[in-house]
Image (cartoon, coloured by chain):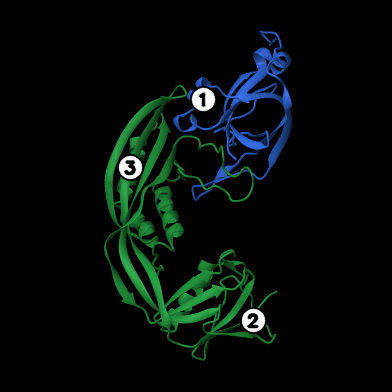
Amino acid sequence: MTAALYLPGDWDAMQAAVQAWASAALAPAVPVIWAKQRISPTGAISTIGAPTPARPYALLDLLTPPTQTGQAERRTAGIAVVFDAPSADAEIYTLVINGVAIPHASPSGAGPFTAEDVRDGYQALLEGLGMDALVEIRPTPGYPAALTLTPAQTDPPVVFAAGTDNVSLKTPLAYFGDELCTFTIEVVTTYPQSAVGAVSTLRLALESESALELLRAGGWAAIDVLSVQERDLTWAGLWEDRSSLDFRLGCRSRRIELQDYIETSEIVGALTA
Amino acid sequence: MPMPFANLGPHVLAQFGRAAAITVERPTAGTFSADGYFAPGAGTLTLAMDAAVMPARAEEMEALPENERTREGILIFTLEALRVSSVSARTQADIVTWAGRKWVVASVEDWTAQAGYASAIALGIE
């Protein structure tokens, strides 16, 4: 079963699902790239001055960011496990809730892991134990959102009590809402290739059950085709054909407010220097 | 083929006041990965060139694409042509370091075969 994805925490994965859907629909002839390229935080060159791929290619862009529609629904979950990572090299071994130890085994046995890895791992563990829980990771400001998990060691562990800066259990209030956002995808071809044909393929893929699975796995539903536009122009002495498809996708958002402590908890582990 | 005009390169640079050598960073070929983002090439070739550099005029900036016209631009004369990004070679545009800042090459007029010089317009990125 695919884990449900929610805004705003899963936005990167949801965006990637849209790109994967478009790539699958147009593959292998038309590569799908993002109109707004990622600027590398390191390196002087990064992606400045990057070329486009050779035509044909498709440019995917977000036209309007997610906007909430209607009233959010408020739900109360059983508990929330909140980690405040004390440092970038924190080692977390075992979460203890009411005396019950819940060890977290990393998926690959090697780090470093992102906060999302830790959250997903504990979320799955707690759900497996039948606990109605929401896990949030809150890295300490000033440190990167990456934790390093290592196998349990035999050294005497350091125990952090609830309410310290390490782990706590709180009553969460979760607000579930519906959001809509609009994407556009523009296909660029040269004569005699047809951009309209590629856009028609995309439009059909918005109605195909197998293609929709990719979007649903990415947390998307409520799909609307808004408009199809066709325009061609001359560029560098060639007939360039462009056609675009605007479509709207609906998704769920989940925002959590944490209330007072309700249980005692501790995390057993050790902090590296 | 003989150069149809005189080799004007040294005269062009002298006429416009040869600046200290500029540094050119020339990225190697990159690729678009499956997730739709451009992954730059692993390496960068760093070149030192003699150049004459001056502010780009408004008329020259107007020849640039719409979203680049209002940026700060410089006009660079060199003996060897700078490079804009290339679709076929999958390379990014040259990055020029001049006056302590970095500039990305946005357009090039390559007269090296005819007259021994080239000019380029580069836009400030830092």
Q: Quadrant of residue A92?
A: bottom right
Q: Residues within 10 Å of mark 1 (few under 14, many from 20)?
A: many
Q: Residues within 10 Å of mark 2 (few under 14, many from 20)?
A: some
The CA span between labels 2 and 3 is 52 Å
Above or below, B84 relative to B57? below
Asked whether disc 2 touches disc 1, contact meaning CB atoms under 8 Å apart, the reply is no
**What tint does the image give chain B?**
blue
Q: Nearer the viewer, mark 1 or mark 3?
A: 1
Residue linked to disc 2: A152
Residue at the far left in the pictured view = A70
Tell me, for residue A245, which label it has, or none: 3
Tell me, for residue B61, which label it has, or none: 1
Quadrant location, the N terminus of chain B: top right
Marks 1 and 3 share the same chain: no
Q: Residue at x 65, y 39 (%)?
A: B28
| Chain under callout 2 | A
Quadrant location, the C terminus of chain B: top right
**Labels 2 and 3: the sequence-earlier one:** 2
Q: Which chain: green?
A: A
> Percent x, y for residue A1?
40, 70
Residue type at mark 3 is: Leu
Q: Nearer the viewer, mark 2 or mark 1?
A: 1
